[in-house]
Image (tube, rainbow, N blue to C red):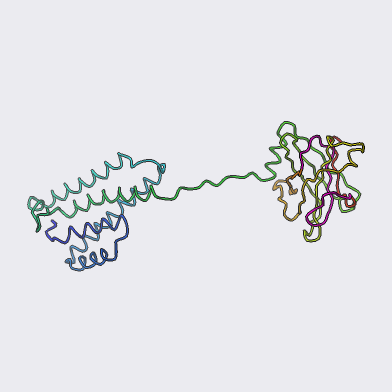
Amino acid sequence: MSASNPNLVRILELLSDQVVGPLSPAEQQELDTLLAALPADQRAMVRSEQLRLERAAAETLAVMMQRDRAAPVPRSLRDRLLASGLAELGNDSTRSGPASPAASMPGGRPSFPVGGMIGWLAAAAAIIFAVFTYQNRPVPVPVPIVPTPAEQRTALINSPGTITASWSPGPDPAGAGVSGDVVWNAQQQKGFLRLKGLAENDPATFQYQLWIFDKTRQTDKPVLEQFPVDGGVFDIAAAQKDPATGDYIIPITAKLRVGDVAAFAITSEKPGGVVVTTRENLLSLAPVGG
């Protein structure tokens, strides 16, 4: 069927715009009015061709989404779509016979076969739609993978210079069932506690505090009688567990640089910890090399 109705060309223009993006209220009203004025058979034809146009755009976008975001429209894809539009134009011209194409319309505008016009607009609109949507979609932000404390501890154990010390019960009976160890790397100034059997604490009442006895700070007193370095406070409820063993893994947060470790100790202190411990509540001790 040739586009002898002068409104068909305008309808096709509006439909192609509608595939690329939403019409303005005025354009939508114009399209609705023009469609309503078409004979029933032409409305059905236009609806069928509109679905073909939308499928072409969707398929093109799907192909584009599989490529790298910065990639331009593939020449092969563009050529294939344009060839498809031209084929539609030629096929419809053959079906319509010699009287269908190129009869002049009012205002000097040429009349094209309806199927050919839709094929051409489908190709052009699909390319525009795909490029605009693909190039302007948000760039996915990669989510950094942060190793768990247990994974960090394992990596530290395999690092040169890392030492390991096992926990022993201290004078405070609350530490009687504590087991586990400490790993520490002086070069990295990094370490982790591994604990099992330490009771969950109420942070509003008391917190656990780690202490590090450093041989390089030695004075005239034995190293375990000196003031140790604060290794940070922690709460059992907030500690992460090793999924393989169920042990609590707690990072060490030394407040001063530590040289040569003699031992680690855990005490229970007031909320927030203390600057100098009285060692009255010494729960566990981990001598290095002992």
Residue drawn 24% across the image and 59% down it: 14
- Which image quarter holds the C terminus? top right
Q: Please say if 60 is above or below 39.
A: above
Residue in the foreground of this view, choosing between 116 and 229: 229
- Which image quarter holds the N terminus? bottom left
Magenta-span inclusion, residue 168: no
Q: Residue 49, position in %: x, y?
A: 24, 56
Residue drawn 90% across the image and 52% down it: 280
Q: Is residue 264 left or right of residue 113?
A: right
Answer with the quarter of the image where residue 159 lies. Answer: top right
Residue in the foreground of this view, choosing between 276 and 248: 276
Q: Residue 133, position in %: x, y?
A: 37, 51
Q: Is residue 66 left or right of residue 96?
A: right
Q: Residue 176, position in %: x, y?
A: 88, 50
Q: Is residue 36 left or right of residue 144?
A: left
Direction top: furthest residue? 160
Q: Residue 223, position in %: x, y?
A: 89, 38
Q: Please say if 185 is above or below 280.
A: above
Residue in the foreground of this view, choosing between 27 and 215: 215
Residue drawn 39% across the image and 49% down it: 136
Q: Main secondary structure of the magenta part?
A: loop
**Residue range corresponding to the magenta coloring:** 256-278
Q: Is residue 182 left or right of residue 151?
A: right
